[in-house]
């Protein structure tokens, strides 16, 4: 596997969670897995063994010297590329809000060096590239390494975790990457609206394109969700599939979650009431345990649909409900929630920033969990919510559509404040029947979205 981040070493988003869990699940099922990623300054790489001191890697006109450090984690070999001129920086992709100008070189090297590792350290049957930073691997295998017996019969899988991030660069980047414009810079190659695209290279030259839920695999073939790639993906629909992400139940399970004041399970839900009272206290909300609490834990970005929450905030404040909100991101969204918390502190308990422990306590202490996303390739929070007996209210898109059904949650389709508000009102109405509500909770808690289930589907994909 080739990726730009993996938990617990370096994380900026959900991609890292996948690379921290899927490889281990595959290893438990008998596969040998190695993951290649950069050794950033911020990477927490403890107990690493240097297994290669000086590996020369050529990228177009550039020559880099790379060292390889290895960590064995949960039965998986994580191989870190140590190249300080490219990776010894404050950020992973950007700094002070601006992408690094040489990201095409930084991640071009990740692709080339990964193939040198495949030749010299770990001989693969499958090269599995994750998102745009690994998008050139299949092209390099089919071009510069085409005659290398290492790659005879090797198949390439590209997983698109979020089509909104594409790795598009000026055409001049081709020279730095050692890609011949005469052969590859055209509409049937890496050219994408006057730029060159890492992701497009992966889509064209990989044997299989995979994304992180079946519904998202269908959605990205439409103009609404395709970000300009919908036509290309429709033409490659024969090799496009979707596998829903899993969740780590070792970390996310109310029966033994270390972040909670009390534990509970489907057979004994009493601890959830204690979690709710503790959450109300933590967020300075009135101790009204009979009043439903809706949780929101999110990045505050355009994708997450939180503008809809702003549109319904006034009528929502008049309902018998409170909101527990945690997140950070765009200043406008932060200011919106800051304002709600100021004018209605009895209804909006708001914490801005990242707090992993509080995220767990909101999942456990809330009665419902809200995800009104514009699009959601897979989503994890709704699966955590189901395990915690916290009934999801979601927009029916991507992985939200695939993981929440009418017996375990509430869904709305149109991206409109009225549709969101109707779904919330339906949930609040259902909450009044506590016996049926507990039945709904238990159905959700019984769902299995473990990585072992997802890994079995990936194994089928590899063997196909």
Image (spheres, rainbow, N blue to C red):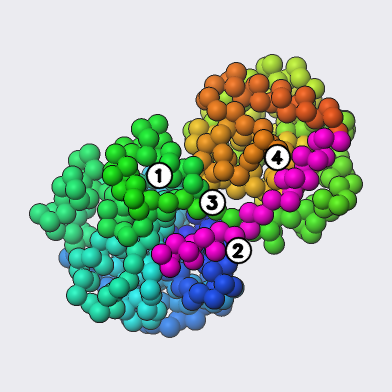
In front: 20, or 325?
Answer: 20
**In the displayed structure, would residue 6 be above or below residue 73?**
above
Provide the residue designation for mark 3: 244
**In the displayed structure, would residue 42 be above or below residue 69?**
above
In front: 288, or 188?
Answer: 188
Tell me whether circle 1 and circle 4 mark residues in contact (CB < 8 Å). no
Spatial CA distance of label 1 from label 2 is: 25 Å
Quadrant containing the N terminus is bottom left
Check disc 3: other Cα within 10 Å, few if <14, some if 14-19, many if 20+: many
Provide the residue designation for mark 4: 408
Percent across and percent down for residue 131 are: 40, 54
Percent across and percent down for residue 453 are: 59, 60
Pick whichever of labels 1 and 2 is earlier in the sequence. Answer: 1
Q: Secondary structure at mark 2?
A: helix
Provide the residue designation for mark 1: 163
Q: Which mark is residue 308?
A: none
Which picture quadrant has residue 225?
A: top left
Residue at 16%, 50% (x, y): give it: 185
Spatial CA distance of label 1 from label 4 is: 28 Å
Q: Work out whether residue 278 can be spotted.
A: no
**In the displayed structure, would residue 401 be above or below residue 252?**
above
């Amino acid at each position: 596997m080739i990726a730009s981040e993996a938990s617990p070493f370096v994380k900026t988003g959900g991609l890292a969670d996948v690379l921290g869990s899927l490889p281990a699940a595959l290893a438990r099922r008998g596969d040998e897995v190695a993951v290649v990623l950069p050794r950033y300054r911020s990477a927490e790489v403890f107990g690493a063994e240097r297994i290669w001191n000086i590996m020369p890697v050529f990228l177009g006109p550039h020559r880099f010297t790379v060292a390889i450090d290895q960590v064995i984690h949960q039965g998986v070999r994580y191989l870190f590329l140590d190249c300080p001129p490219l990776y010894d920086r404050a950020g992973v992709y950007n700094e002070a809000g601006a992408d690094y100008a040489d990201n095409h070189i930084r991640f071009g090297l990740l692709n080339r060096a990964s193939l040198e590792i495949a030749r010299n350290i770990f001989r693969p049957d499958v090269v599995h590239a994750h998102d745009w930073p690994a998008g050139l691997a299949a092209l390099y295998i089919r071009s510069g390494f085409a005659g290398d017996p290492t790659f005879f019969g090797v198949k390439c899988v590209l997983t698109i975790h979020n089509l909104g991030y594409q790795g598009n660069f000026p055409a001049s980047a081709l020279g730095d990457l050692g890609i011949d414009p005469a052969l590859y810079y055209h509409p049937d190659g890496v050219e994408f609206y006057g730029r060159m695209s890492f992701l497009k290279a992966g889509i064209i030259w990989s044997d299989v394109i995979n994304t992180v839920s079946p519904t998202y695999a269908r959605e990205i073939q439409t103009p609404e969700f395709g970000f300009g790639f919908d036509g290309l993906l429709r033409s490659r629909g024969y090799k496009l599939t979707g596998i829903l992400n899993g969740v780590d139940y070792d970390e996310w399970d109310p029966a033994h979650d270390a972040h909670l004041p009390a534990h509970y399970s489907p057979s004994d839900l009493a601890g959830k009431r204690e979690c709710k009272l503790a959450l109300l206290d933590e967020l300075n909300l009135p101790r009204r345990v009979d009043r439903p609490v809706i949780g929101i834990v999110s990045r505050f970005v355009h994708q997450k649909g939180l503008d809809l929450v702003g549109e319904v905030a006034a009528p929502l404040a008049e309902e018998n409900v409170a909101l527990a909100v945690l997140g950070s991101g765009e200043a406008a969204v932060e200011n919106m929630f800051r304002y709600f918390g100021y004018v209605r502190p009895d209804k909006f308990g708001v914490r801005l920033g990242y707090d992993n422990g509080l995220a767990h306590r909101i999942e456990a202490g809330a009665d419902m969990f809200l995800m009104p996303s514009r699009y959601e390739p897979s989503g994890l929070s709704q699966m955590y919510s189901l395990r915690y007996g916290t009934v999801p209210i979601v927009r029916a898109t991507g992985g939200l559509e695939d993981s929440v059904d009418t017996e375990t949650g509430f869904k709305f389709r149109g991206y409109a404040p009225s549709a969101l508000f109707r779904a919330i009102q339906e949930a609040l109405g259902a909450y009044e029947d506590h016996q049926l509500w507990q039945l709904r909770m238990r159905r959700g808690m019984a769902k299995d979205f473990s990585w072992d289930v997802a890994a079995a589907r990936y194994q089928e994909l590899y063997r196909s």
